[in-house]
Amino acid sequence: MITSVFYRQLDSTKLEYERIRANGSPEDRWIIRTGEQTRGQGRGENTWHSPAGGLWLSFDLPYPRPVASFPLYVGFCLIRLLNRLYGLSSLRLKWPNDIFLEGRKLAGILCAHLQNPSRYLVSLGMNTGVGRDDVLHELDAAILSEYIGLPVSNQYLAQLFIHNLQRNAGLLDSPETYISWCAENLYGLGRQAEADCGDMIIRGRIEGLSDAGFLLLKGKMGKLASISHGSLRIL
């Protein structure tokens, strides 16, 4: 059974999903959305500013095994959906999990593979219709409604996004399709960047993605590094 819930305010849709799952049946599925988050989560210890008006969403997607390139698949589906709805050809995917619009961050994606039963937890934060407050102004963030000149229905967009992930899940069996697309639409392609892998920092020029979806950085001596995980900063 899939249950969809909406809260006026939450600390985090991801945290709420984890609380509900811990206290419910593992077979149940949930779609959780909120009007605003007080503790929106980014990668690692990062936070995500989540004022009223944005799309703040967590949901689960059954899948029998973990896929290393799953965050790229989610980004691929989201960008293709936004392109189709709004004709935003300048959208780019910043490896591994951010969506940029004309060089400004629009959305962030978190993915976690869960067991018993096997599924992915997908969390999305997107500046769809937020007001440009001091924080967003300082971050120079992209706001979708500003670019399209129209209000955005977060409920409708969330439904389409989830539907697209489910409908195209067969691509996860042949990931070269979406990985090659993501490689051509990488934010910062050809620019110098720094990847923080936790135990080391690797610098180089962004060359694209490997067949597995790992980031390829070319160092000063021409050596190509394949980055499987971490955060990326464009220099």
Image (cartoon, rainbow, N blue to C red):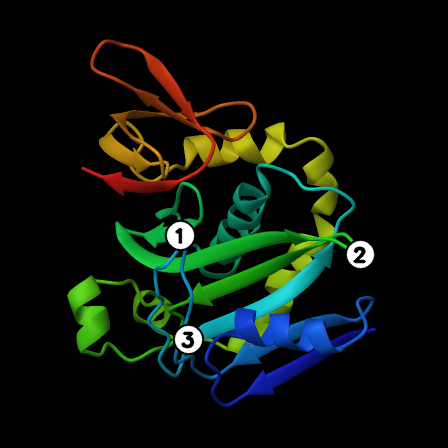
Q: Which residue sits furthest front? A: 199
What amino acid is labelled 2 in the image? Pro
Q: Is residue 157 visible?
A: no
Q: Label 2 belongs to which residue?
A: 117
User: Is 157 situated left or right of 95 in this image?
Assistant: right
* Secondary structure under the numbered disc 2 in the rendered image: loop
User: Is 227 situated left or right of 232 in this image?
Assistant: right
Residue displayed at 62% across by 72% down:
17
Please report whichever mark, 3 or 2, sits nearer to the chain's N-terminal start.
3
Q: Quadrant of the C terminus?
A: top left
In the rendered structure, find residue 137 and report the number of the disc placed on it: none
Please report whichever mark, 1 or 3, sits nearer to the chain's N-terminal start.
3
Q: Label 3 belongs to which residue?
A: 54
Figure check: 161 above or below 102? below
What amino acid is labelled 3 in the image? Gly
Q: Which residue sits furthest bottom? A: 8
Please tell me in which quadrant of the rendered image residue 186 appears: top left
In the rendered structure, find residue 99 and report the number of the disc placed on it: 1
Look at discs 1 and 2 and give the one toward the viewer: 2
Q: Tell me the distance, in whole angstroms, between the alpha carbons under discs 3 and 2.
A: 30 Å
Please tell me in which quadrant of the rendered image residue 188 appears: top left
